[in-house]
Image: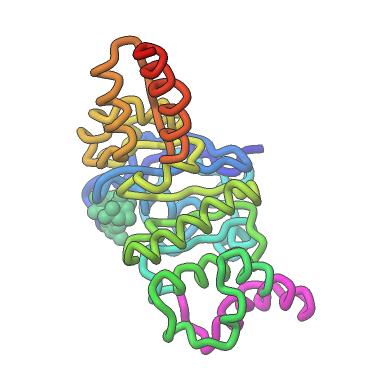
Amino acid sequence: MRALEFNDVSFTYKGSGSKALEGVSFAVNKGEFITLLGRNGSGKSTICLMSNGLIPHALPGALEGAVRIFGQEVRERSVAEFSKSVGIVFQEPESQLFCMSVEEEVAFGPENLAVPREEIGDRVEWALELVGMKGFNDRSPFSLSGGEKQRVAIAAALSMRPEMLVLDEPAYALDPVGRFELYSVLKELKQKHGMTVVLAERDPEEAVAFSDRLLLLEDGKIAGVGATRNVLRDPQKLSSLGIAPPQLSELAALLNSRLPGESFSFLSVEEAERTLSEDFFAQGRARRA
Ligand SMILES: Nc1ncnc2c1ncn2[C@@H]1O[C@H](COP(=O)(O)OP(=O)(O)OP(=O)(O)O)[C@@H](O)[C@H]1O
Ligand SMILES: [Mg+2]
């Protein structure tokens, strides 16, 4: 069973004259990390909201095609039911936090599921540790930085023990330090916990280092999908869709154009450093010798 499956999905928000999504088909396997990329209005949030049933249950409209979340058709279950398997984190940290303390915030979801008190305590500690917010239990969420708020929002989703996490531009409102810490958490979710993640981003710079696949959107349609490395081999395509190519992809493209026969591609600085010192610089030294 797939974690998520869109089969020829089109959607028009109620009252809108145009389709927000048109003929969208893709699937996400369990344990996969997929990043949705596209400029403003391309349909990223619409896909996120459909991935836990908020569309069409809370935001109505005309939905065609089939959306399956862990095998369940989106129209056939409530958002409350999907919330047991799908956690969602939005762009604005302020809009998601409403409790008096960090601990209450993270305990809120499992309390509503009537999880036993002791287990809730364990889940809260586990989730806060995972997002690097251990010891913040008694702090007011309103006293936190934007990045800390977003990490509490992720902890609040994780304490439900979801099978899939959906994040809609979670770094949007954060400063560079907040962004760095947030992406460190996402990387850990992928590398240590094998979490199934759907991440929406306008800018792929950080996410490419740990995304299995990229899905490119334009005007509500899929403009490309593939393994991260393959999609990044065509930085011009990204640019044409209003997506800034990662700097490392541009560097690789530049080297490939200057060095016939090479086909570099780098997903991280570490990888670039390793490849260049093994391959390129070593050859250079050999040529000079
Ligand atoms: N509540 C709504 N009612 C009507 N139309 C909407 C609504 N929300 C989004 N849309 C429209 O649906 C299309 C897709 O929007 P969506 O928010 O999914 O894009 P996005 O890629 O998330 O954009 P952004 O980068 O700005 O967040 C756009 O044309 C948008 O104007
Ligand atoms: Mg959006």
**Residue shown at the point (66%, 74%) measured from the top left:** 124
Q: Residue furthest front?
A: 289
Instruction: Indicate the position of residue 243 as horizontal and vertical percent values.
Output: 26, 41
What is the chief secondary structure element of the magenta stretch? helix
Judge from the rendering whether residue 157 lies leftward or rightward of residue 251; answer left or right: right
Instruction: Indicate the position of residue 100 as horizontal and vertical percent values.
Output: 52, 89
Judge from the rendering whether residue 38 lies leftward or rightward of residue 151; answer left or right: left
Count of picture labels:
0
**Residue shown at the point (58%, 57%) measured from the top left:** 86
- Which quadrant would residue 91 be assigned to in this image? bottom left
Judge from the rendering whether residue 242 lies leftward or rightward of residue 164; answer left or right: left
**Residue shown at the point (64%, 66%) measured from the top left:** 160
Q: Quadrant of the C terminus?
A: top left
Position of 157 relative to 227 (above/below): below
Q: Which residues are magenta?
A: 97-124
Report the front residue among 224 and 11.
224
**Residue shown at the point (40%, 43%) measured from the top left:** 36
Q: Looking at the image, in which quadrant does ligand 2 appear?
A: bottom left
